[in-house]
């Protein structure tokens, strides 16, 4: 993403138009006003003029907008905190990931591609400091379903049921679950023999799949039909596979979504897909990155190494959108809060100056500092309360827009909807107190004499 000159031009144009529109009304009022009347009425206005109403409406709008943005930012903050606690279903620490795109013209069959992948896995596993090596297609948190969704069905189910049932397909290498530290709940993981060209008869499912399809039944040993791409006929066919293991759930597309039921098959089952290797190391894997490139090149110089990095950085990248939305909403909310406070301070200050004579009369008749403070602060708090009420109503409707980005918090989170108005009330009280403090110093004799 780069800076766009057209965006700057548009923003500048909007700023100029806004300045003209909001400066036009007071300018016209000043030009059309009667100077003698203005001097005569100085200090006698009690705040009920049309100009005061317009200023009040604008400040109420500022407070309303500020509340909406603050609630949005509050929801994003709570959501981001919840994401930090989300268990993705794997351990990203000390794991290197990379892609090794295989030239299809050089490795025409599934057997050739599977053989190359197995040999590369063996070379990587022999590197000192490497604990386990696996591979998957596609990598979790890839940001979309991509090509991973397929159909499945129980033996004997109708064609309609088969086409309706959808699950994520993950083609993996032996060692993948160990390298990712995905929990094995029952059964076994894949063996080296499962990744042979003739071995197309086993599968592993996650806990979501087992619960949905088998309920309380034991899925181990059960047979299901799955999609398999036949390279000879260049079409998909249904093959029966036996479930040999059940593993823990993994967040496949994003940390904010639970994910779909998942079926894991050996890589040779879908060897036409690009493979992402995962290499778990005993310590910080940064020092092994050059060695990984060397091993791939030594096996075949025509196979490039792409997207070489750590799984931790991959997970952090998956959270970048949430971080961006958090920063953006917080920035706008902070600016709106400052503008609302300044606007409220300005309106209350202007009103207090207009009511100088009234305040002088009140003090002369025995009003205390507390009475004056209550009068001025009360006016400001009434304006703030009006904006808060409107803002709460608007927030209830608008926060549903960001509900898809929230994790672990609802769009109507009571903590946020209760806490943000309290913060805004506190800021409003401070913005109103400063003019009230100045009003308490008014000399009643001088105020009446100036009249």
Image: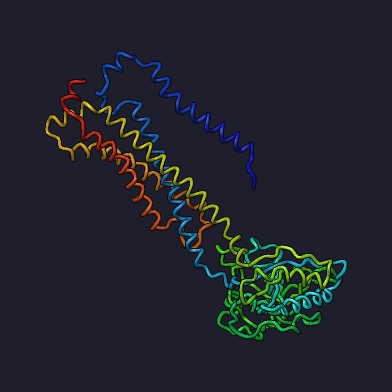
- Examine the image and state in which quarter residue 303 appears: bottom right
Rendering colour mode: rainbow
In this rendering, would 356 be left or right of 63? left
Measured from the top left, where is residue 284 in percent x and y? 61, 71
Looking at the image, is 31 positioned above or below residue 365? above
- Find the residue positioned furthest to the front: 287
Q: Which residue corresponds to the image point at 25% horizontal and 24% vertical from the top-left?
A: 43
- Examine the image and state in which quarter residue 243 appears: bottom right
Q: Quadrant of the C terminus?
A: top left
Nearer the observer, 286 or 426: 286
In this rendering, would 175 be left or right of 185? right
Nearer the observer, 279 or 270: 279
In this rendering, would 210 be left or right of 83? right
Q: Which residue corresponds to the image point at 46% horizontal and 56% vertical from the top-left?
A: 77
Measured from the top left, where is residue 374 in percent x and y? 22, 40
- Examine the image and state in which quarter residue 179 appears: bottom right
Looking at the image, is 50 positioned above or below residue 323? above
Measured from the top left, where is residue 63 in percent x and y? 39, 41
Q: Taking the image as drawn, is residue 151 in sight?
A: no
Q: Which residue corresponds to the image point at 40% horizontal and 45% vertical from the top-left?
A: 391
Q: Taking the image as drawn, is residue 143 in sight?
A: yes
In this rendering, would 15 be left or right of 197? left
Looking at the image, is 403 positioned above or below residue 182? above
- Find the residue positioned furthest to the left: 366
Measured from the top left, where is residue 406 in percent x and y? 51, 58
Q: Which residue corresponds to the image point at 82% horizontal and 73% vertical from the top-left?
A: 299
Nearer the observer, 216 or 434: 434
Nearer the observer, 44 or 245: 44
């Amino acid at each position: 993403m780069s800076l766009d000159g057209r965006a700057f031009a548009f923003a500048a144009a909007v700023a100029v138009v806004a300045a003209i529109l909001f400066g036009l009304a007071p300018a016209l009022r000043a030009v059309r006003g009667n100077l003698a009347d203005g001097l005569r009425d100085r200090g006698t206005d009690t705040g009920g003029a049309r100009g005061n109403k317009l200023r009040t409406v604008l400040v109420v709008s500022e407070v309303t907008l500020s509340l909406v943005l603050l609630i949005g930012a509050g929801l994003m903050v709570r959501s981001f905190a919840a994401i930090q606690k989300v268990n993705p279903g794997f351990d990203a620490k000390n794991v290197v990931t990379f892609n090794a795109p295989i030239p299809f013209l050089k490795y025409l069959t599934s057997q050739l591609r599977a053989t190359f992948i197995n040999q590369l896995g063996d070379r990587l596993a022999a590197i000192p400091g490497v604990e386990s090596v696996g591979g998957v297609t596609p990598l979790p948190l890839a940001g979309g379903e991509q090509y991973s969704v397929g159909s499945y069905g129980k033996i004997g189910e109708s064609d309609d049921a088969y086409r309706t049932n959808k699950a994520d397909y993950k083609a993996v290498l032996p060692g993948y679950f160990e390298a990712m530290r995905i929990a094995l709940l029952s059964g076994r993981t894949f063996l080296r023999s499962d990744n042979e060209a003739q071995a197309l008869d086993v599968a592993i499912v996650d806990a979501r799949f087992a619960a949905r399809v088998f309920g309380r039944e034991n899925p181990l040993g059960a047979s299901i039909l799955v999609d398999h791409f036949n390279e000879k006929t260049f079409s998909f066919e249904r093959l029966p596979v036996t479930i040999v293991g059940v593993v823990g759930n993994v967040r496949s597309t994003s940390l904010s979504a639970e994910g779909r039921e998942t079926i894991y098959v050996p890589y040779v089952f879908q060897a036409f897909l690009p493979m992402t290797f995962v290499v778990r190391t005993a310590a910080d894997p940064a020092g092994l990155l050059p060695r990984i490139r060397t091993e791939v090149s030594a096996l075949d110089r025509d196979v490039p190494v792409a997207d070489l990095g750590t799984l931790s950085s991959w997970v952090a990248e998956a959270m970048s959108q949430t971080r961006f939305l958090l920063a953006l909403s917080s920035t706008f909310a902070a600016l709106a809060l400052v503008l609302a406070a300044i606007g409220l301070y300005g309106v209350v200050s202007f009103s207090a100056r207009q009511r100088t004579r009234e305040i002088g009369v009140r003090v002369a008749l025995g009003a205390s500092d507390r009475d004056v403070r209550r009068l001025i602060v009360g006016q400001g708090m009434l304006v703030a309360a009006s904006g808060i009420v409107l803002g709460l109503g608007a927030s209830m409707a608008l926060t549903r827009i960001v509900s898809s980005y929230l994790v672990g918090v609802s769009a109507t989170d009571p903590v946020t909807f209760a806490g943000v108005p309290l913060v805004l009330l506190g800021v409003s009280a401070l913005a109103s107190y400063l003019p009230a403090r100045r009003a308490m110093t008014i000399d009643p004799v001088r105020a009446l004499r100036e009249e």
